[in-house]
Image (cartoon, helix red, strand yellow):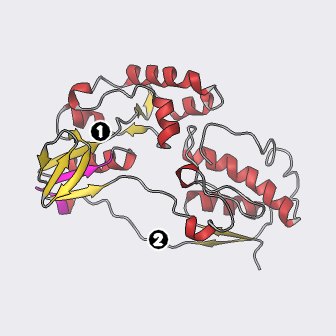
């Protein structure tokens, strides 16, 4: 019988399983899912409206514009914090890692400076600069949008930015400014909640943004939203959890207490 059951075989689940196996702790992975196909071919020549301007929404809109959609529009409620993947070859994620323990009051000005230095003013295209980028991250639990061509597509108007959607009225989509558009297809990239209430709601509390609290022998990995980057934080947290699970199961793998479970209560800027 396995010592640990891991629910979800995404990057976080696989990282945890590998770390546990390296320390002779057996784990079983449970996964249920289906493949999501981002294929723009069915939308060639069509008028498509994407709702939501996170990383998924902006990349889908770009796929549509480059894949031959007759018209690609994206409806935005909250102006996203857009950053380049790198600045002159320097990965932007390293900045997130470096500043993750800075006081939050210093991070809004810092991210504002980064945005202005790397991204042109897009206010005339319907994408104003967020007034408080890090505070927006804290309140909405949404990571910055990393530009992979979306900015250029907005500037050359192959992607059209429109106000937020307030209602659907027959074929019409009613926008926040009172105008109406009539797309052939609507794609909702509006995010999601973890939805763990049916699974663990009776054994632990569900906090802000649907993030559950850990309990003895019940841990959550890869479910928080990290300013330092998802995979980086998963790597760190999987090491820490390996130490905690080893203690709970009485395995105590060699030298796990040093480096793996060091400072387990420290909290960087990410939701857990």
Q: Say how many tags the image has.
A: 2
* Residue drawn at x 62%, y 65% as measured from the top left: 201
53 horizontally vs 14: left or right: left
Which image quarter is the N terminus in?
bottom right
How packed mark 2 is, by other alpha carbons closer than 10 Å (few <14, some 14-19, many 20 or more), is few
How packed mark 1 is, by other alpha carbons closer than 10 Å (few <14, some 14-19, many 20 or more), is many
46 horizontally vs 24: left or right: left
**Magenta segment boundaries in residue numbering:** 42-52
* Residue drawn at x 74%, y 54% as measured from the top left: 241
Residue 167 to residue 132: above or below: below
Q: What's the CA distance linking mark 2 and mark 1? A: 29 Å
Choose between 155 and 22: the one closer to the eye. Answer: 155
Q: Position of residue 200 (x, y in %)?
A: 63, 67
* Residue drawn at x 52%, y 59% as measured from the top left: 194
Q: Position of residue 6 (x, y in %)?
A: 65, 67
Residue 266 in view here: yes
Residue 63 in view here: no
Residue 222 to residue 129: above or below: below
Q: Which residue is mark 2?
A: 33
41 horizontally vs 266: left or right: left
Farthest bottom residue?
1
176 in magenta: no
Choose between 152 and 4: the one closer to the eye. Answer: 4
Question: Residue 150: which numbered mark, if any?
Answer: 1
Q: Position of residue 57 (x, y in %)?
A: 33, 48
Give the mark nearer the N terminus: 2 vs 1. 2
């Amino acid at each position: 019988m396995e010592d640990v059951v891991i629910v979800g075989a995404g990057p976080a689940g696989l990282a945890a399983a590998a770390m546990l196996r390296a320390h002779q702790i057996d784990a079983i992975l449970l996964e249920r899912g289906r493949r999501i196909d981002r294929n723009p071919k069915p939308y060639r020549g069509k008028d498509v409206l994407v709702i939501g301007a996170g990383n998924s929404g902006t990349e889908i809109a770009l796929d549509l514009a480059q894949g031959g959609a007759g018209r690609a529009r994206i409806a935005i409620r909250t102006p996203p914090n857009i950053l380049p993947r790198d600045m002159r070859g320097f990965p932007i994620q390293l900045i997130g890692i470096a500043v993750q323990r800075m006081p939050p009051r210093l991070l809004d000005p810092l991210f504002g400076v980064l945005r202005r230095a790397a991204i042109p003013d897009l206010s005339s295209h319907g994408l104003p600069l967020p007034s408080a980028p890090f505070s927006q991250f804290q309140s909405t639990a949404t990571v910055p949008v990393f530009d992979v061509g979306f900015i250029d597509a907005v500037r050359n108007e192959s992607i059209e930015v429109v106000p937020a959607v307030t209602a659907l009225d027959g074929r019409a989509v009613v926008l926040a400014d009172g105008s109406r558009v009539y797309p052939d297809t609507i794609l909702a990239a509006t995010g999601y909640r973890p939805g763990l209430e049916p699974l663990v709601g009776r054994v632990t509390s569900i906090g802000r943004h649907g993030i559950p609290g850990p309990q003895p022998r019940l841990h959550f990995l890869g479910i928080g939203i990290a300013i330092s980057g998802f995979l980086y934080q998963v790597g760190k947290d999987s090491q820490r959890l390996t130490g905690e699970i080893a203690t709970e199961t009485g395995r105590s793998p060699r030298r796990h207490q040093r480096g793996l479970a060091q400072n387990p209560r420290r909290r960087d800027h990410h939701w857990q």
